[in-house]
Image (tube, rainbow, N blue to C red):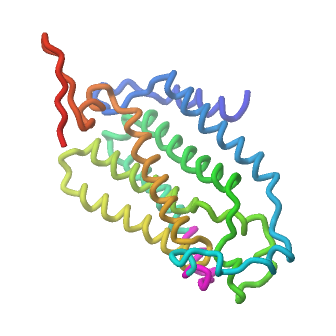
Amino acid sequence: MSSSKILFFSLILLIPTFAQSPYSFDLDNEAILYGTGISLAILENELLKQREPITIEGLNSISKSNLNSFDKIATYNWSPTANTISDVLLVVTIASPLFLLTSSDVHNDIGTYTNMFIQNAIFSYSLTYLAKSTLYRLRPYVYNPDVPTEEKLTKGSTLSFFSGHSTMAFSSAIFLSTMFQKYFPNSKFTPYIWGTSLVCASIVGYLRIYSGQHFPSDVITGAIVGSLVGYLIPLIHENRKDKLETLPFKIHTNNIFSIKINF
């Protein structure tokens, strides 16, 4: 049996009977989500194997003049230290949703919560690297004459669009904040959770630009994609009643069918 199947069935065994949970586990939905996410990951991995690094000839032919003015600023940046700090902060950001498991309310729902946490990570990763493997874009530091040539002549230097760090950081931030607000709707700490998580994710994005690893447009795209993943994964798993209450419109069926839209 493959490792992905073992993981999937292990998660099923973890699903407890927690009647008050705002989220649900549906076997059909989970099969589709895991199947899609893992398939995308396999596809991008195969595509990345075919990616060739830039050559010396290619390096000599590139020019900053071909870049848009918004992104060009990143080509002057290069900081291995900032790159390392962004890696460390990303790990902290990704792991941050797990701190909710210290609460008994969430811990009693550990199977469903862990399931969503894993799916959030899978889709953040697979969507990012699917784009990287299909869209060829050199990292900003490739245009920087102060960067050693050997750093530029790697496959990784061609994987600029879009920022995986930003995607993972923002998906984790939105996932954590959304889940906290759902499990603790009356908590006074909700604004602080949202603020702190988004600031941390933004710092990760800034460091990716400052280190010369990504253009601003890479980071912005990653932030948008990550935010959508972090929002949609919990939404897909919401109980039917809770999900309807979060929609911007309400459907009433009381003898006469009507739709009420709130803006």
The quarter of the displayed image where residue 77 is located: bottom right
Magenta stretch bounds: 73-87
User: Which percent across, then down, holds residue 120?
Assistant: 50, 45
Residue 158 image offset from top left, x and y in percent: 72, 65
Camera-nearest residue between 263 and 181: 263
Question: Residue most toward the left?
Answer: 255
Residue 146 rendering spot, x and y as whole percentages: 70, 89
Whether 85 is among the magenta residues is: yes
Q: Residue at x 28, y 42 (%)?
A: 182
Above or below, comparing residue 25 to residue 77 in the picture: above
Residue located 61% across and 75% down the image: 67
Identify which residue, 43 or 86, lies in the foreground: 43
| Residue found at the far top of this picture | 255
Tell me: residue 136, above or below residue 24.
below
Residue found 70% across the figure and 60% down from its top = 136
Q: Is residue 162 left or right of residue 190?
A: right
> Main SS of the magenta segment?
helix
Q: Residue 233 location in percent, x, y?
A: 44, 40
In the rendered image, which quarter contains the C terminus?
top left
Q: Can you say which quadrant of the picture contains the N terminus? A: top right
Which image quadrant for residue 87?
Answer: bottom right
Residue at image position (76%, 53%) is: 48
* Depth check, front residue: 44 or 73: 73
